Amino acid sequence: MSTSEDTPDLTDPIEENRALQETESRVAIHGHPLHAMLVAFPVALTMCVLGADLLYWWTGDPFWPVAAAWACFGALLMGVIAGITGTIELLIVPGIRNRSASWTHFVLAVMLLSILGANWLLRVGQPEEAVLPLGLLLSVLAAAMTGLTGWHGGKLVFDYQIGTKSDGSSRPRG
């Protein structure tokens, strides 16, 4: 007959959620995640594109479409750089990769980069002609997608502590 002293302590791996616990950033400088540091630039520049388009619509000043085109280029470039760091995190950190919310954020970010790319290509060589109506519509769509993508990214950080140092004890399950 076996006693409790002979049986090893067994834990249910599903209950333990080991694959969801490791969420600390590996693409970081002294513990500061690069993706989180870089993402502020495309967010701000995307909103600048919308602002410049609205100012052009309001004033007719040819400065604003040129400013919007450069802001759009900067948003796309910095978005791609931030996206590369985020994609590396997604692929190499199990606690990030194994969450469906991470993949939702990834898909939304790729869609946003596609919109920014289309908006920038529309403006190359003809910034004034590109603003109304299609450039402005793409700017509004990009701003809305930025909000949605950012909300999902924030949810990963605040609800699941993705990219942060934590022992996992305060994380919600699931």
Image: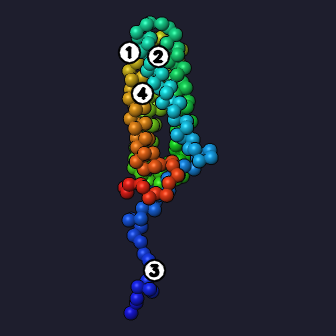
In the picture of the structure, the residue carrying the numbered disc 1 is 133
In the picture of the structure, the residue carrying the numbered disc 3 is 8
Q: CA distance from mark 2 to mark 1?
A: 14 Å
N-terminal of the pair, mark 4 or mark 1, is 1
N-terminal of the pair, mark 3 or mark 1, is 3
How many residues crowd around disc 4 within 10 Å: few (fewer than 14), some, or many (20 or more)? Answer: many
Q: CA distance from mark 3 to mark 4?
A: 55 Å
Label 4 sits on what residue type?
Answer: Ala
> In this rendering, would 164 be left or right of 30?
left
Q: CA distance from mark 3 to mark 2?
A: 66 Å
Q: Nearer the viewer's eye, disc 4 or disc 2? A: 2
Give residue 142's mark.
Answer: 4
In the picture of the structure, the residue carrying the numbered disc 2 is 52
How many residues crowd around disc 1 within 10 Å: few (fewer than 14), some, or many (20 or more)? Answer: few
* Residue 67 rendering spot, x and y as whole percentages: 52, 16
Position of the C terminus by quadrant: bottom left
For the image, the number of numbered tags is 4
Q: CA distance from mark 3 to mark 1?
A: 69 Å
Label 3 sits on what residue type?
Answer: Pro
Question: Eyeballing the image, is 12 above or below 167?
Answer: below
